[in-house]
Amino acid sequence: MNFRLEFTGEARLDIQDFFNWYNLRKAGLGNDFVLCIESAINQILRDPMHCSPQFKDVRRKLVKRFPFHIVYILRDSLILIIGVFHTSRAPEAWVKRVKRMRD
């Protein structure tokens, strides 16, 4: 099955913000971060059901090398990336975002 991939505006901002933050720490580190995000997204595209649901239909994919996970919803043939969150953040952060998105 071919899946369609979409990002919320907040998810795009998450990636941009962390890219900038890492580049301020070390030149080129932001690029490494984005490559790891892309790799995780490609894994999601290959097997979106690999990650088990965490909250209703919301799933999380851990990013290699960086302490982040990608939060997404799988609906039929759509993968909707809700955000990229640091693993130290409480789950309430992404649960709130999901609830706001659904309201």
Image (cartoon, grey):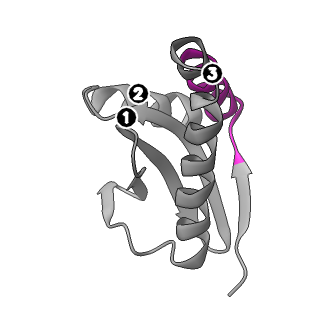
Q: CA distance from mark 1 to mark 2?
A: 4 Å
Evaluate if marks 1 and 2 touch, with contact meaning CB atoms under 8 Å apart. Answer: yes
Q: How many residues crowd around disc 3 within 10 Å: few (fewer than 14), some, or many (20 or more)?
A: few
Question: In terms of sequence position, does the residue under pointer 3 or pointer 2 come before the other?
Answer: 3
Most common SS among magenta residues = helix
Q: CA distance from mark 3 to mark 1?
A: 33 Å
Please name which of the two marks, 3 or 2, marks the residue nearer to the observer: 3
| Disc 3 target residue | 27
Estimate the x, y position of residue 27 in percent, counting from the top left. 62, 21
Instruction: Out of 94 and 40, give the one closest to the viewer.
Output: 40
Q: Amino acid at mark 1?
A: Val
Q: Where 89 sits versus 3, above or below?
A: above
Q: Residue at x 37, y 67 (%)?
A: 51
User: Circle 3 — which element?
Assistant: loop
| The N terminus, quarter of image | bottom right
Q: Residue at x 67, y 74 (%)?
A: 77
Q: Which residue extends farthest front? A: 27
Q: Residue at x 32, y 67 (%)?
A: 52
Q: How many residues crowd around disc 2 within 10 Å: few (fewer than 14), some, or many (20 or more)?
A: few
Q: Amino acid at mark 3?
A: Ala
| Disc 1 target residue | 95
Q: Is residue 13 magenta?
A: yes
| Disc 2 target residue | 96
User: Circle 2 — which element?
Assistant: helix
| The C terminus, quarter of image | top right
Evaluate if marks 3 and 2 touch, with contact meaning CB atoms under 8 Å apart. Answer: no
Q: Where 21 sits versus 92, above or below?
A: above
